[in-house]
Image (cartoon, helix red, strand yellow):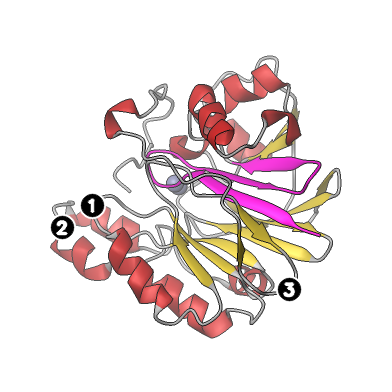
């Protein structure tokens, strides 16, 4: 039994995470345009026909901007909490919306998707664990601090997308105004490299085969630095940085605990100028994050 995972994009310019088995898949957040989502999946040999639902973590535009077009085109149900939905100024016309509640897993075919609350500057933010035949994959981004919910779920994951948003020194020395630095560092902001590393070192289960470092800040982080930092302590876990500009390869996750990496194709670097246009949705875009 296997789960296939990839980050189609990760960062304040757009997030979209794919988790699926041989028959069906879900997307957690769609912050890419429909066309870009299709293009990146196509390069990986993944098809939208397998995608059966979209789960929404919170209302920030880097997580939702592509949902209306994609959901309508493929007739995909969107699972979202009522409070998150009420804070989104997108048109939901023609889209099937389903509410979900923390700790009430939703079944999509053979996949089970369990949402749980997290600390973040949003109305009703949730993280997710997607499970299939005893394999657990976590999607843990946009988190101000690692709470007991996160710890419990992280320690059960065979693979996880884990936020490493900023390096303390780069943020401190950077040009962001003080109030923004405080918000990023705050309890409802984002996880630093150090906070994520503490979680990883303390609670990583032996069977975690893949750690995908996610939602890196463009200004306040360095992919090379954070990859080295985690790899140093990773033991048998394969450490991957999820890019702000391209998809990762597809990783195969099993219960064996051994890293099995079978990229379908090499990731293609997309030029920054080709970034998808996003509709202006909400003044609270937090795009600097
Ligand atoms: Zn975000
Ligand atoms: Zn956010």
> Can you tell which mark lies on residue 256?
3
Q: How far across and how far down the image is residue 65, in percent? A: 49, 29
Quadrant placement of the N terminus: bottom right
Range shown magenta? 1-28
Q: How far across and how far down the image is residue 102, in percent? A: 72, 55
CA separation, marks 1 and 3?
37 Å
Q: Secondary structure at mark 2?
A: loop
Earlier sequence position, callout 1 versus callout 3: 1
Q: How far across and how far down the image is residue 125, in percent? A: 57, 50
Q: Which residue is mark 2?
A: 174
Question: Between residues 55 and 85, which one lies in front from this camera angle?
Answer: 55
CA separation, marks 2 and 3?
42 Å
Question: Between residues 54 and 119, which one lies in front from this camera angle?
Answer: 54
Q: How far across and how far down the image is residue 83, in percent? A: 62, 40
Which residue is at 18% across, 56% downward? 178
Q: Secondary structure at mark 3?
A: loop
Q: Is residue 55 visible?
A: yes
CA separation, marks 2 and 1?
8 Å
> Can you tell which mark lies on residue 219?
1
């Amino acid at each position: 039994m296997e789960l296939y995972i990839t980050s189609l994009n990760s960062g304040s310019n757009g997030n979209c995470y794919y988790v699926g088995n041989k028959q069906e898949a879900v997307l957690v957040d769609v912050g890419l345009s429909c066309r870009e989502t299709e293009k990146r999946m196509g390069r990986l040999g993944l098809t939208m026909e397998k995608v059966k639902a979209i789960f929404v973590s919170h209302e920030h535009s880097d997580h939702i901007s592509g949902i209306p077009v994609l959901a309508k085109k493929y007739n995909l149900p969107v699972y979202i909490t009522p409070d998150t939905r009420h804070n989104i100024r997108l048109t939901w016309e023609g889209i099937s919306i389903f509410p979900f509640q923390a700790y009430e897993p939703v079944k999509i075919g053979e996949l089970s998707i369990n949402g749980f609350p997290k600390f973040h500057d949003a109305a009703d933010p949730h993280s997710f664990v997607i499970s299939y035949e005893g394999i657990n994959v976590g999607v843990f981004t946009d988190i101000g601090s690692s709470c007991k919910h996160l710890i419990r779920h992280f320690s059960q994951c065979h693979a996880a997308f884990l936020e490493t948003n900023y390096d303390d020194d780069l943020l401190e020395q950077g040009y962001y105004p003080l109030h923004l630095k405080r918000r990023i560092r705050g309890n409802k902001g984002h996880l630093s490299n150090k906070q994520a590393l503490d979680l990883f070192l303390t609670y990583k289960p032996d069977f975690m085969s893949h750690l995908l470092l996610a939602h890196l800040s463009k200004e306040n982080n360095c992919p090379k630095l954070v990859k080295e930092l985690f790899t140093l302590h990773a033991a048998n876990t394969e450490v991957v940085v999820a890019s702000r500009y391209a998809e990762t390869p597809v990783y195969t996750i099993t219960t064996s605990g051994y890293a099995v990496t079978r990229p379908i194709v090499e990731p293609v670097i997309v030029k920054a100028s080709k970034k998808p246009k996003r509709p202006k949705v909400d003044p609270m875009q937090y795009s600097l994050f």
